[in-house]
Amino acid sequence: MNWFLWALLSAFFAGLTAVLAKVGVAHVNSNLATAIRTVVILIFAWSVVLFTKSQSIATIGRRTWIFLVLSGIATGLSWLCYFRACNLVRLPRRPCRQAERCGCDCLSRNFSPRAGDLASLGRGLLIFTGATVLAYAQ
């Protein structure tokens, strides 16, 4: 499969994840929901690693470990905040996902060797503004 099909599948599963998470967090503490989801993801991810040809953990460099750990912490914090937002208000997932996209675009300007230009920053600000309007229009 080419990259575009993988990107479409990623978008589909991200949308499915948000919908299922919103329903799943409806009657449970958001921290407990995050912990349950994390255990499921942990089992799934290690199953994929063990049943496919994968790189040995011993070959991963120190710098890569640092960024993977930081990424994991950021993912956990993102989930905690998202589930808490879902618990606090009847919030559609779209504003959260759009704001997430803006955060990703802005932060990637600091870490990516292919940082975006001023036009991409402008687009990001417009998306963030739209997400804010959608969130408060409820």
Image (cartoon, helix red, strand yellow):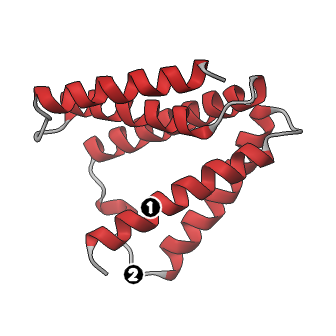
Quadrant of the rendering where the N terminus is positioned: bottom left
Which residue is found at the position 44% from the left and 61% from the top? 10
* Residue found farthest to the front: 137
Query: Toward the viewer: 59 or 18?
Result: 18
Q: Determine which of the numbered discs, if any, sits on residue 10 in the image.
A: 1
Q: Which residue is mark 2?
A: 53
Amino acid at the residue labelled 2: Lys
Pick whichever of labels 2 and 1 is earlier in the sequence.
1
Residue 16: percent from the left, percent from the top? 61, 58
Drawn side of residue 39 relative to residue 32, left or right? left
In this orientation, does residue 28 appear?
yes
- Judge whether 49 appears above or below 129 on screen: below
> Neighbour class for label 2 at 10 Å: few (<14), some, many (≥20)?
few
Amino acid at the residue labelled 1: Ser
Residue 51: percent from the left, percent from the top? 52, 81
Residue 7: percent from the left, percent from the top? 36, 63
